[in-house]
Amino acid sequence: MAGVGPVASLFCCVAESRLGRCLASAAVASVNGRSPLPVRERACHPTGGPKEAGGTTMSNQVPPFPDGDPPPSPSLPPSYGSGPYDSGPYGSGPYGMPPPGHPPYGSGRPTPVDVLGRPLASWWQRLAAILIDSVILTIVTTLLGYLFVGTSTAALGEGASGGAAVLVAVLSLAIDLAYFGFLNGSEKGQTVGMMALGITVRDVATGGRIDPRRAALRIVVLDPGILLSSIPFIGVIASIYTVVAALSPLWDAHRQGWHDKVARTDVTRVR
């Protein structure tokens, strides 16, 4: 170190001594399997610590969480059957189900009711009832025709005389009017077929009974063939009309047939 001043010589000695300590610490750390540059010796490195490949300074300590608390652990989703939608409001049953006493959702338009709130009879109930009544009337008319006239309505098309045909037609008319007039015009308002199906004829305005005259008018409007069946060609037209009149409740919002509208009646369910 000849030619170097006292201050420069002192600086070199300090640097050499500091560099020697750094090298010694690195050698000891390598033997112990630790990082050659621990945190307390980071001042030996010109940039304050070891660097990654990208040039950023690495730290031997994990940085704390930003808010001081660790993030919450992920929670499992709620199991089916325990969520807020498993029961409707006010105890009305499972979600998606109607309250007790109401029809299921999507079951179609509500059943129409009469003036007293009773449900109206379906077309199938009315059809089944009139079929039962027709069977009963056919049996009764046939028996009475053989008893009083010596022929029946079934034999009219097989060469029965004109007088016999008229007598059987009058007998059939009387039986039909009496059957429907008195039974539909009674307090119950039910024929035998209606009793079997649990339906009845009621007044559309009051929900009460109708009188026998209105009941007889109702069946004549439904089946004018009981008056016109013996007239050629007219009887055929009357039969076609009866079929359409029997189908008319299907497209009426109040389930009334043409004969119900004329007689101002409803057909309601009683059970």
Image (spheres, rainbow, N blue to C red):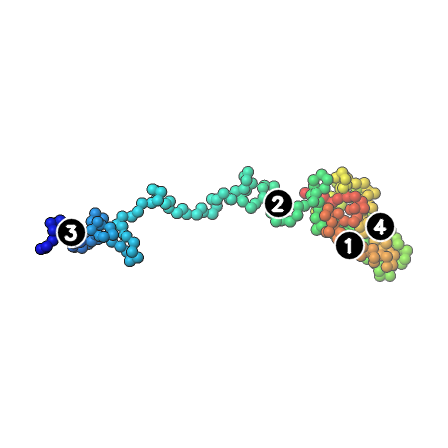
Residue 17 relative to residue 173: left or right: left
Q: Which mark is residue 103?
A: 2
Task: Answer few, some or many: residues within 10 Å of disc 1's Cα (few below 14, many 20 plus, some between 14 and 19).
Answer: few
Residue occupying image coordinates x 17% and y 53% = 26
- Visible residue check, residue 178: no
Quadrant location of residue 182? top right
Q: Secondary structure at mark 3?
A: helix
Disc 4 or disc 2, which is closer to the eye?
Answer: 2
Name the amino acid type tagged 2: Pro
Q: Residue at x 24, y 50 (%)?
A: 48
Above or below — where is 269 with respect to 240?
above
- Check disc 4 and report the residue beneath it: 173
Q: Quadrant of the C terminus?
A: top right
Q: Is residue 78 left or right of residue 185?
A: left
Asked which secondary structure carries label 2, the reply is: loop
Q: Which residue is mark 3?
A: 15
Question: How many marks are shown on the rendered structure?
Answer: 4
Query: What amino acid does circle 4 point to?
Result: Leu
Residue 257 position within the rendered picture, expressed as x and y whole percent measured from the top left: 76, 49
Whole-percent x and y of residue 50?
24, 53
* Front tag of 3 and 2: 3
Q: Which mark is residue 244?
A: 1
Q: Residue at x 55, y 40 (%)?
A: 89
